Image: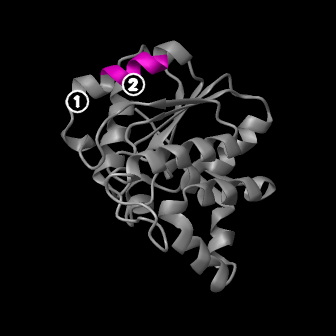
Amino acid sequence: MERHILVVFPHPDDESFGVSGTLAMFAEQGVPITYACLTLGEMGRNMGIPPFANRETLPSIRKKELEDACRVIGIHDLRLLGFRDKTVEFEDEELLTDRISAIIAETNPSLIITFYPGYSVHPDHDACGAAVIRAVERMPKEKRPVVHCVAFAKNCEKEIGKPNIVRDVSAVIDKKIAAIQAHRSQTEGLMKAATKYGGDAITRFKTERFWTFKW
């Protein structure tokens, strides 16, 4: 039983695709979850199918979608940190680390979930994960929370080994699908394709993988 979970990702929908099953399971157990989302994903390419957003309206639409997804998952503490999408790698490292450190100090999580720096494909993902690791490294070793990282680069298992945790989230798959669908501007086409071409995509959603970060 975790005391408190802190999730730190850069974009709306990162939580839904990668870890919403795990989070929904913990939420059902009554574990409090804080989600610190660095940006609003305002530079996302997708505008809905057919398009219902534009570059001006996308930030507010994605904010509402994120709030809806969190409600489905059972996340009641959403923090929007206000960084700009696709520029996290260029942010002042100390500023970014300080912001995350402050949330860690406030929430005192027993578990942090983020991206594995260097193995998460998108520069924002890697920069986000690196900032979390820096924040935790500031803490005395005996007081550091466990950090579970999401990785999906092609070379990740070869370089960092197999995931430490492979979790079956079939019991909450309806919540996970609903959380993904809440991000309608980004996921509607994908979910339609998944439904049209069979259950393989849905089956993949039933398993979530994590690497425990080791210092």
Measured from the top left, where is residue 84 in percent x and y?
28, 41
Residues at marks 2 and 1 touching, judged by CB atoms closer than 8 Å? no
Mark 2: amino acid: Ile
Who is closer to the viewer here, 127 or 43? 43
Q: Please, what secondary structure does the residue beneath circle 2 have? A: helix
Measured from the top left, where is residue 4 in percent x and y?
64, 24
Quarter residue 98 falls in: top left
Instruction: Say above or below: 124 vs 37.
Output: below
Measured from the top left, where is residue 210 in percent x and y?
55, 48
Mark 1: amino acid: Glu
Instruction: Say above or below: 17 vs 210.
Output: below
Instruction: Say above or below: 110 vs 123.
Output: above
Q: Please, what secondary structure does the residue beneath circle 1 have? A: helix
Which quarter shows the C terminus?
top left
Who is closer to the viewer here, 153 or 7? 7
The residue that label 2 is drawn on is: 100
The residue that label 1 is drawn on is: 93
The verdict on residue 103 being magenta is yes
**What's the magenta bit mostly, secondary-structure-wise?**
helix
Who is closer to the viewer here, 101 or 177? 177
